[in-house]
Amino acid sequence: MNRLLLLSGCLLSALACASPKYLTYEQFGAKGDGVTDDFPAIIATHATANEKGLPVKATGGKTYYIGNSTGTAVIRTDVDFGTARFIIDDSHVSLEDREDYIFRIESSFEPFDIDGIGSLKRDQTNIGKSLPGRCLVEVVNDNRKVYIRLGANQNSGVSQKEFFIVDADGNIEPSSSLIWDYDEITRMIARPIDDKPLTIKGGIFTTIANQAPSKYTYYGRGISVERSNVRIEGIAHYIEGELDHGAPYEGFLDLHIVADIVVRDCLFTAHKTYRTIGSAGVPVSMGTYDISAHGCVGVKWENCTQTTDINDTHYWGIFVSNFCKALTLDHCVLSRFDAHQGVRNVTLTGCEFGHTGVNVVGYGTLLLDGCTVRRKSLIALREDYGSSWEGEVIVRNCKLIVPEGAKNVSILRGSNAGEHDFGYTCYLPEIIDIENLVIDDSRVSDKDYQGPMILGKFKRNYGKGVINIRNLEVTSGKPLGISLEPKMFRDYTISVR
């Protein structure tokens, strides 16, 4: 009897050993020779991995070529790309297939509608309904337009919407609190947040750039993250074959309506800047952000950098976000941080930003701690969205390095003449609190330069509050001014010591 049990145990153990611990692309026909189109094999590998609940591991030393084959590899299990290389050849991708991502990281949970909620109020703490579990919720009012853009890329705005996290009891997590009242709700969608983290790590990806005309025909062709609770580690992305023209990309790493994401030790590449005609009928600069986030809550980038010089103006800025909350960048070296259509709460620690700097419009707390910015302003409030920040700005132990040729140096820059309806009331920060800031303006050679200003060339007074500045160093020795139009800021209590 004991012998039978022992034999049975050995047989079960042998069967377990025979079962694969992970899948490889070679098992599904990939060559990895850098010439054969391995995309069908890659798609098949992940489809089987999802079915069997197995991770995928790329083979070190292999180069997987992804050419004109259509489709998307859907990822629902852990992936270790390791030291393998992937060539994404977009030089001949058709316009019809340009929006297909190479990899899409998905949840096994399906979104569902939340019905029966007629309105929501700003900073409301509970939605009045229970949910199956913790969810990322999107609320939309299609009958109100916001972020009505001004300038060469003007538009008629987008539907009022935002994203927030709700627990099973209907409580709204404070980090994602509502920024607007919703007197009417046209749709409300919940996306369950996975309890178990998914890990994607490694891989050296090279995009051979598209050769399409320089128009706003965006390409996907990267990694789309559409599942919450994901860890992305050690991915490197390069770009080759850019011409003097090309269409923009959505971002090689595109985070789309997700929460609880960490992107760590990754390397990105900026794209060339092109010219096209904007919606106002005038020429505009156009480019691609290699990192993008839309409708995200609780995303952290750690130790991420880029291959291209962060101060090279031939390349477009590298980072953009829209409708996000609770974003953190920690010890990243990037040409740009940009929050287009609103952000609530941003923390930038130990970072260095290049020629396009820190650009925001939004709400809550904007914290810069231990950061270096190489631009004529430490922070730029985006003029095309009303130069609005409703909340506070906190600066600690930072350095502003002003490049050659700059004029009108300022800590906070923006412009709003009050002649355009952005779809919301615009604000300047209620509190601006700065400690240990160095402004290196030694390269400013303009003979009319009066010195740095706290507030840049704003065209009207639409803010009031408190400005406290302690331990400021200006390299040129010139005095710190309030503004070129100081009377506009008479409603601020200003202390500099």
Image (cartoon, rainbow, N blue to C red):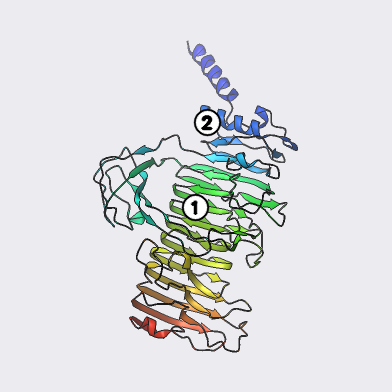
Does the image show residue 425? yes
Q: Could you tell me which residue is drawn at 65 percent across and 28 percent down?
A: 28
- Which quarter of the figure has residue 72? top right
Compared to residue 413, the image places residue 238 above or below, namely above
Residue found farthest to the left: 128
Q: Could you tell me which residue is drawn at 69 percent across and 55 percent down?
A: 245
Identify which amino acid the numbered label 1 is placed on.
Ala
Q: Which mark is residue 293?
A: 1
Residue topped by disc 2: 50
Q: Which mark is residue 1?
A: none
Instruction: Locate residue 317, reporting x and y percent.
Output: 58, 61
Does the image show residue 303? no
Compared to residue 214, the image places residue 76 above or below, namely above
Q: Secondary structure at mark 2?
A: helix
Compared to residue 371, the image places residue 320 above or below, namely above
Crowding near pointer 2: few (<14 within 10 Å), some, many (20+)?
some
User: Looking at this view, is 160 or 466 the one in front?
Assistant: 160
- Which quarter of the figure has residue 334? bottom right
Instruction: Locate residue 228, reporting x and y percent.
Output: 45, 44
User: Looking at this view, is 191 or 475 the one in front?
Assistant: 191
Identify which amino acid the numbered label 2 is placed on.
Asn
Relative to 328, is 97 on the left or the right? right
Relative to 191, is 292 on the left or the right? right
- Which quarter of the figure has residue 7? top right
For the C terminus, give its image quadrant. bottom left
Which of pointers 2 and 1 indicates the residue nearer the eye?
Answer: 1
Q: Secondary structure at mark 1?
A: strand
Instruction: Locate residue 321, reporting x and y percent.
Output: 49, 56
Relative to 461, is 335 on the left or the right? right
Q: CA distance from mark 2 to mark 1?
A: 25 Å
